[in-house]
Amino acid sequence: MTSSGQNPRPKPNPLARSEATPGGFIDGDRRRGRGAQSNHTGRFESERRIAFDDGWESLGELEALRTEIYEEPARSIITRNKSPDISFDQSINPYRGCEHGCIYCYARPTHCYLGHSAGLDFETKLYAKTNAAELLEQELARKSYKPAVIALGTNTDPYQPIERERRITCSILEVLERTGHPVGIVTKSALVVRDVDILSRMAARGLAKVALSVTTLDRHIARAMEPRATTPAKRLEAVHTLSEAGVPVSVMVAPIVPGLTDSEIERILEAARKAGATEAGYVLLRLPLELKDVFREWLQEAFPDRANRVINLLRSMHGGEDYTPEFGRRQKGSGPYAEQIALRFRLALKRLDMNTRRQSLRADLFKPPVAKGGQMNLL
């Protein structure tokens, strides 16, 4: 999990592509330890670059793909949404792109807005929002700001490997703790336990909760699907550590990949409950935009014997399509197979006594920070 380069944000350039063989596929040795198989040009680019061997075996001289980190001073930091099927109204994503390389990540297509690919670019070209904590203080200090839970990790993981060095997520938590602001975290990284002291203090005041994403308990499937993410066993250890520290913890079985991981629903929930999780939820596999091709390529390579079944089951839950974007259906699907998954999940939750005491976070303890150049409240 090495990273190289701490560069300013590059200008989008449709020709600045990672070298690829015809069709955008990259040699297996160069992408070892990565999720995607290819680096196809994004949907916003007018030109396409394809590398080819000129007969002198020039492609064989290319080095393995390395992680590049670009510093990106953000203009604003709190993102707001009005989606009726999402449980939060505002969120913060400290990073763009994610080195975990999860092949199913629905955030992959967002990298195309930067002139990159949803494939290998997404997991090798990362952007760090270096001024996140400073911007957060400014936005919280506005007189018009009304406190509500801020979700961390809604697009890319706030505890992906570069957080070890950058500590942007940690700096955000420090601001939220200081101002008494509620926060909910979603991650699949055991690195979250590094901040257990902050989180336990906030949890004691009803200001923090954490959700760990566990897609499978099978190490081999996890390694293939999430090549640089924490192992399932370590995620469950993180659940236990946070729970013991008094932090409310839930587990997200997300995404459920039909025909590949859906048989594990009950086992994942049992392991999560044993580790200390009191709440759980799930999301079905989503394949919007470029992701449908990225996922299909990987599936055919990693599990060729299951590929057709996985796609056919998925399409059966989306009206014959790879994906339906409608609110309510996009995350849970519809049809007999989707209903069966929902029923199994509900029965397992009931048997394990989960989701019976949902933790609500407080917003009444919020005290706005003093804006730079501002005056403290006299009362």
Image (cartoon, rainbow, N blue to C red):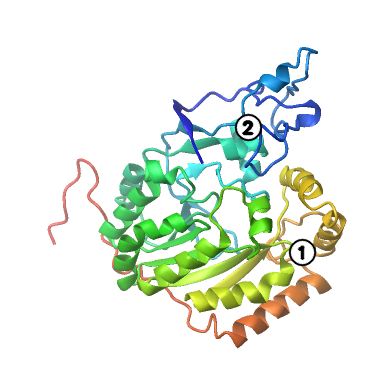
Q: Can residue 247 be seen in this view?
A: yes
Is 362 on the left or on the right of 92, as rendered?
left
Is the residue marked by circle 2 packed among few (<14), some (14-19), or many (20+) residues within 10 Å? many
Q: In this view, does 257 lie above or below 229?
A: below
* Quadrant of the snapshot with the C terminus: bottom left
* Residue occupying the point 45% across, 42% down: 162
Q: Where is residue 72 in the image (x, y as percent from the top left)?
A: 44, 33
**Residue 13, image quadrant:** top right
Query: Where in the figure is residue 119, as x and y percent of width and height?
Result: 68, 38
Amino acid type of the residue that numbered disc 2 sits on in the rendered structure: His
The residue positioned 85% from the left and 55% from the top of the image is: 305
Q: Is mark 2 on a helix, strand or loop?
A: loop
Select label 2 or label 1 by which is in front.
1
Q: Which numbered circle lies on residue 103?
A: none
> Would you name the residue on which mark 1 appears?
258
Depicted 169 relative to depicted 48: above or below: below
Residue type at tag 1:
Pro
User: In screen coordinates, is 148 left or right of 54?
Assistant: left
Q: Mark 2 points at which residue?
A: 116
Viewer-nearest residue: 231 or 82 = 231
**Label 1 residue SS:** loop
Q: Considering only vertical position in the picture, is 219 above or below 128?
A: below
Query: Whole-percent x and y of residue 250?
Result: 51, 71
Residue 349 higher or lower than 324, as above or below: below
